[in-house]
Image: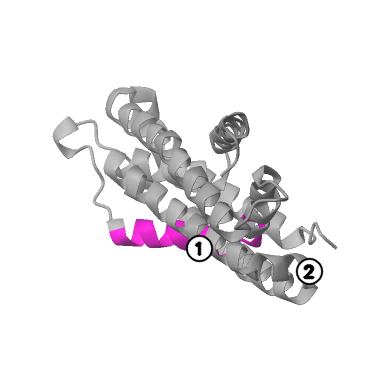
């Protein structure tokens, strides 16, 4: 493992990256607003599980293949982009009243399929080659060139990065769930949430589709 100052820098950098809004935060907040804190936490767990796949893949060299092979990168890129766009279109076409949170606290939660929420969060990250390349580019910066077992160090740092992301992701879920329970303005405008989230997911998918392999 890195020395303590380097390790603290790694943790701080990871927190800053996780605080930056993006598709993951949007997915967590969307589910927490619609179905409560538990749904947001499940969404976060799905996203983090997808990150673990990329950590292990990077350690085993799959991400190196994505970084050097234009074909491998392009195939996974288009699969991920198609999945994001598909999710976005489904949200855009959802019935307007389906995501409105009732004002009655006893009925505040919209019934949620937690397994589906987890699965979608998992697939959103697994099918995004940018996540794989992120771990391949970010984590090695904190591994000393003379480290005796770089693969183990990579896995430990990847584990640490993902575990450190949980408090932030859970915090987003709690804040969104709190707002859905107590902020009337949020409740009145929740029927636009699916549309806004859908448009953003389509945008993220199109942006991924048009991206180039950064290592080309």
Residue 177 sits above or below residue 73 on the image: above
SS category of the residue bearing label 1: helix
Q: Is residue 130 above or below residue 166?
A: below
Residue linked to disc 2? 68
3D distance between C-alphas at marks 2 and 1: 19 Å
Give the number of the disc on residue 128.
Answer: none
> Pointer 1: what residue?
53
Instruction: Give the percent coordinates (x, y) of residue 52.
Output: 48, 58
Q: Position of residue 129 (x, y in %)?
A: 65, 62
- Quadrant for the N terminus, please: top right
User: Can you see residue 117?
Assistant: yes
Query: Can I make out residue 89 in this image?
Result: no
Q: Which class describes the residues within 10 Å of circle 1: few (<14), some (14-19), or many (20+)?
A: some
Query: What is the magenta range?
Result: 115-131
117 in the magenta segment: yes
Answer few, some or many: residues within 10 Å of disc 2's Cα (few below 14, many 20 plus, some between 14 and 19). Answer: some
Q: Main secondary structure of the magenta part?
A: helix
Q: Residue at x 71, y 66 (%)?
A: 64
- For this view, does 56 lie left or right of residue 64? left
Tell me which residue sits at (31%, 47%) in the image. 39
**Closer to the camera, 193 or 50?**
50
Helix, strand or loop under label 2: helix
């Amino acid at each position: 493992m890195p020395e303590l100052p380097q390790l603290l820098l790694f943790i701080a950098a990871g927190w800053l990256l996780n605080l930056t809004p993006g598709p993951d935060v949007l997915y967590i907040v969307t589910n927490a607003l619609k179905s409560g804190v538990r749904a947001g936490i499940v969404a976060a767990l799905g996203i983090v599980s997808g990150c673990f796949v990329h950590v292990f893949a990077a350690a085993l060299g799959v991400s190196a293949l994505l970084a050097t092979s234009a074909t491998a990168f392009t195939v996974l890129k288009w699969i991920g982009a198609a999945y994001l766009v598909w999710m976005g279109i489904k949200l855009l076409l959802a019935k307007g009243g389906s995501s409105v949170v009732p004002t009655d606290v006893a009925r505040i939660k919209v019934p949620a399929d937690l397994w589906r929420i987890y699965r979608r969060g998992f697939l959103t990250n697994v099918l995004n080659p940018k996540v794989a390349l992120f771990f391949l580019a970010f984590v090695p910066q904190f591994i000393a060139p003379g480290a005796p077992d770089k693969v183990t160090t990579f896995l430990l740092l990847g584990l640490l990065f993902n575990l450190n992301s949980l408090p932030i992701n859970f915090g987003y879920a709690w804040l969104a769930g709190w707002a859905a329970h107590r902020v009337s303005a949020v409740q009145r405008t929740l029927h636009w949430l699916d549309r806004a989230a859908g448009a953003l997911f389509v945008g993220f998918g199109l942006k991924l589709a048009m991206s180039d392999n950064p290592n080309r």
